[in-house]
Image (cartoon, rainbow, N blue to C red):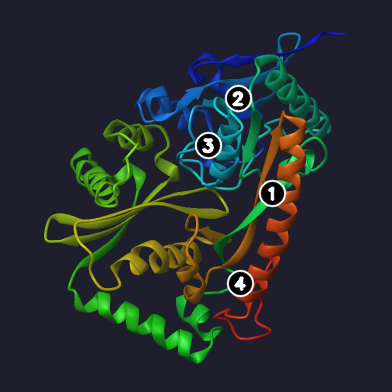
């Protein structure tokens, strides 16, 4: 019987792309070799921003059986699962929280596969073996912890036991639920919510902008110049770092054009606002917003309503527009559970964090009930409330 071994790769380019993608068992773009490599090759993921690639591969002999997109982190930026309080508690006790091991997709709070093991009969056992290897790496490397952010439900189930600590939060997703078109979605809503959405869309029409939906292959480099500039300016206005470089946008268009979808607003030849999305066979993922200036209703139009219409035109089941945002609820996006898993090496901190997560879980359950009390949909309509 061939021996099992775990290896950490400092560049995903060291791993054969076909072998990596063979383990995905889905077509979600964020865990594809091309997407992760584009982040690295473009300089969007780099150690100066706190991301040191350390991709994990589990081999049986020379055969790759499982893998995980992994990073050694010296901060908690760009993760969307907030553990700042844990880091501060370590600091108060004069212990090092960083570096930590993070299994995730940088800058992407999108649920999906994280413990990649294919779809065969042995996939579940390979995921469990990979989890065991991760805990051993943490212990041998003297790391404080390992974190798996936004795993799919099946992948989260692999670690929903000691010593891993399961955690969850809520995002707001749109489920098509058999709707034929946007008018059909509105008809399922309460009259006041329906009226508010129509008024928001009317405000955008009165702006006189040309709205268009473009897919990756049709975009020119000059258009990508404008799109990236809008992305960067919007981040900088909010005193945030625009981590994605201009080159990343070109890499994405060249390597994954079928996954890239842009909602654009033009004034003449100039793009004045954009919402950048990715898609797979079932879902549209809203990722980045950029605009020259704030205009009434334009953010909601490009980031939400245009995306809903795209899903209905193309037969997609879901639209996941990104993290946070209670304002999404009134626009047809209902709370959906998103998960994370955490291995805390220090036994005392593991016990304290487990207790804290129990309290957080109860608070999130109350929050979920409060959200559903404000659902925009009429009672009894076929929408998934998780």
Local SS, label 3: loop
State which mark lies toward you, 4 or 1. 1
Q: CA distance from mark 2 to mark 3?
A: 15 Å
Q: CA distance from mark 4 to mark 1?
A: 31 Å
User: Can you name the residue that lies furthest to the left here?
Assistant: 268
| Disc 4 and disc 2 in contact, CB within 8 angstroms | no
Which corner quadrant of the image does residue 112 belong to?
Answer: top right
Local SS, label 4: loop
What residue is drawn where x is 58% and y is 31%?
A: 102
| Disc 3 and disc 4 in contact, CB within 8 angstroms | no
Q: Which residue is mark 3?
A: 105
Q: Which residue is mark 2?
A: 20
Any mark on residue 167, and which? Answer: 1
Q: CA distance from mark 3 to mark 4?
A: 31 Å
x, y (%) of residue 255? 40, 32
Q: Earlier in the sequence, mark 3 or mark 1?
A: 3
x, y (%) of residue 98? 55, 27
């Amino acid at each position: 019987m061939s021996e099992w071994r775990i290896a950490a790769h400092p560049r995903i380019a060291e791993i054969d792309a076909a072998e990596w993608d063979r383990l995905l068992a889905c077509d979600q773009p964020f865990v594809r070799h091309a997407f992760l490599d584009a982040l690295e090759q473009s300089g969007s993921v780099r150690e100066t921003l706190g991301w040191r690639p350390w991709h994990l591969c589990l081999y049986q002999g020379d055969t790759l059986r499982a893998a995980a997109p992994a990073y050694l982190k010296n901060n908690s930026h760009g993760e969307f699962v907030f553990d700042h309080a844990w880091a501060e508690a370590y600091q108060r006790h004069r212990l090092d929280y960083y570096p930590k091991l993070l299994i995730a997709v940088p800058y992407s709070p999108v649920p999906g596969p994280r413990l990649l093991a294919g779809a065969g009969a042995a996939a579940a056992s390979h995921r469990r073996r990979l989890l065991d290897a991760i805990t051993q790496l943490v212990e041998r490397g003297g790391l404080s912890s390992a974190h798996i952010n936004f795993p799919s439900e099946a992948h989260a189930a692999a670690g929903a036991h000691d010593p891993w600590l399961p955690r969850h939060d809520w995002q707001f997703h749109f489920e098509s639920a058999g709707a034929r078109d946007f008018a059909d979605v509105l008809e399922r809503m309460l009259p006041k919510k329906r009226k508010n959405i129509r008024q928001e869309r009317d405000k955008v029409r009165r702006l006189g902008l040309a709205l268009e939906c473009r897919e990756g292959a049709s975009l020119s480099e000059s258009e990508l110049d404008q799109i990236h500039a809008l992305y960067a300016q919007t981040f900088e206005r909010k005193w945030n770092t625009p981590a994605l470089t201009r080159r990343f946008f070109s890499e994405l268009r060249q390597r994954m054009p079928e996954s890239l979808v842009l909602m654009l607003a033009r004034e003449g030849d100039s793009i004045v606002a954009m919402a950048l999305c990715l898609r797979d066979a079932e879902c549209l993922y809203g990722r980045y917003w950029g605009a020259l200036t704030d205009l009434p209703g334009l953010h909601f139009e490009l980031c939400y309503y245009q995306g809903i219409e795209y899903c209905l035109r193309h037969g997609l089941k879901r639209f996941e527009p990104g993290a946070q945002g209670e304002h999404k609820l009134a626009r047809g996006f209902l709370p959906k559970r998103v998960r994370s898993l955490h291995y805390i090496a220090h036994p005392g901190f593991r016990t304290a964090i487990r207790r804290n997560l129990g309290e957080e879980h109860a608070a999130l359950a109350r929050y979920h009930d409060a959200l559903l009390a404000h659902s925009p949909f009429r009672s009894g309509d076929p929408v998934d409330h998780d």
